[in-house]
Image (tube, helix red, strand yellow):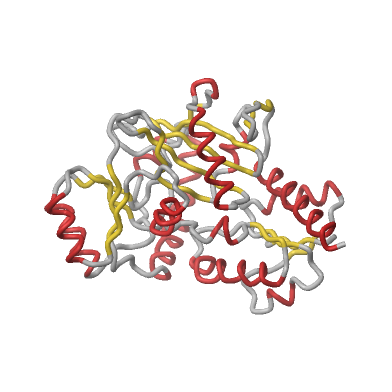
Amino acid sequence: MIIGIHDRPGSFSDRWIAYCTAKGIPFRRVNCLATDVVAQCGGLEGLLWHWYHGDPTHLLVARQIIAALEAKGLVVFPNVATCWHYDDKVAQKYLLEAVGAPLIPTWVFTSLQDARRWIAGTTWPKVFKLRCGAGSANVRLVRSRNEAAALCRQASGRGFPAAAGYLTDIQTRLRKTKTAQEFWVRLARAPQTLLNVLALRRKMTREKGYVYFQEFLPDNTFDTRITIIGDRAFGFMRANRPNDFRASGGGSIIYAPEKLDRRCVEIAFRVADHIGTQSLAFDFLFNPQHEPMIGEISYCYMSSAVHACAGHWDHQGIWHAGHVWPEEAILEDFLAAIRRKTQTAQ
């Protein structure tokens, strides 16, 4: 059994390669962005590629390549069910509605006329989002009809930058800089980071032609992040940023499994099973009736935050103590899927 790994330093591939090397699992590095990627996968049983939203080239071809390799018969991570809706909140709205998940009430309009009629008859505030962006980027609170109407006009005109600007969220980044050494390291990286941001904004097309609004759920001082990997559910809470309604990207994580609402775990397992995903993170808020509601989902997440969990639950609600690297859990499930496929073929 030989597997392929797209080697992207700083991604999940670091631990995949280390794990395979330590365990003696044969693997081959594959360049998933090459024109001959299908040929490179000849003789492989499966492929691992941790593609992400911050690379415009990944966004351009990753979903198509994943679907093609699945059609070829490879076991892939992420599979289509796991990633086709990644970094696309519009896709997530329709998917979660289709499987009966408790989605926070969400409205998407591609008609300016329909949007205006809805704006005139709804209540405020609402949360405005772009379909793309992580860590609360491209998310804002809209407090009035006039503000919503202005966003609609912009969406039907020049649109919005898909990539956040260099100074976006600067207060949060400074707050997460704990030491003088970290500050100087960030400062030294600033010129290159600025160039990267500018290049990203040039490559990514502006978001236009639609508006996305979500119900604002007041009195939530934190959100709940549940990450499902196969038969494992990892959970923690994230405190809101100071004087802000948003939690994602703030960096204030609360590890207290005894305080976590277990209904979030049950819902996340149920929805992940229905979708057929290999690994998926769910962000929950609570409505005024204190019912957990899903705001967003993502197959990409911060590995170290999941590893810091003291343990995880399985489908039966049994707690398993111990820290787990999500990359290794994904790889173990991936190898098991290849073995099942091979046994079935025999």
Identify the residue at horizontal 50%, vertical 71% (top origin): 60
The picture places residue 105, in percent across and down from the top left corner, at 32, 46
Q: Is residue 260 above or below residue 193?
A: above
The picture places residue 84, in percent across and down from the top left corner, at 52, 61
Specify whether 338 is left or right of 33.
right
Identify the residue at horizontal 57%, vertical 58% (top origin): 81
Identify the residue at horizontal 15%, vertical 52% (top origin): 147
Which quadrant, please, contains the C terminus? bottom right
Residue 325 picture quarter: top right
Residue 292 picture quarter: top left
Q: Nearer the viewer, residue 195 or 138?
A: 138
The picture places residue 284, in percent across and down from the top left corner, at 43, 38
Which quadrant, please, contains the N terminus? bottom right
Tell how many labels.
0
Identify the residue at horizontal 38%, vertical 39% (top origin): 172
The picture places residue 241, in percent across and down from the top left corner, at 35, 34
Specify whether 277 is left or right of 115.
right
Specify whether 172 is left or right of 330.
left
